[in-house]
Image (cartoon, helix red, strand yellow):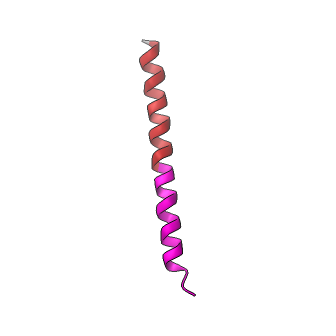
Amino acid sequence: MSKSPQKYVWKTAYTWVLILNALYILGFYVFMNWFQN
């Protein structure tokens, strides 16, 4: 049983989650600032 491919897939998915989360926070911040001005 090789765990290497499974770990790679998990790490890739986790990286995408972090990227999407960062984009969501950034987009929300810009959205709120845009409506305040």
Which residue does the image show at 50% across and 60% down from the upper left?
13
Q: How many marks?
A: 0
Answer above or below: position of 2 versus 23: below
Q: Main secondary structure of the magenta part?
A: helix
Residue 13 is one of the magenta-drawn residues: yes
Answer above or below: position of 19 versus 4: above
Residue 2 is one of the magenta-drawn residues: yes
Which residue does the image show at 41% across and 18% down from the upper left?
34
Q: Residue furthest bottom?
A: 1
The one nearer the camera, 19 or 1, is: 1
Q: Residue furthest top?
A: 37
Residue 2 location, quadrant: bottom right
Q: Residue furthest right?
A: 1
User: Residue 18: image x %, image y %?
Assistant: 50, 50
- Quadrant into which the C terminus falls: top left
Answer above or below: position of 32 versus 20: above
Answer above or below: position of 14 versus 35: below
The one nearer the camera, 9 or 25, is: 9
Give the magenta range.
1-18
Residue 31 location, quadrant: top left
User: Residue 26: image x %, image y %?
Assistant: 45, 34
User: Residue 1: image x %, image y %?
Assistant: 58, 87
Which residue does the image show at 50% across and 64% down from the upper left?
11
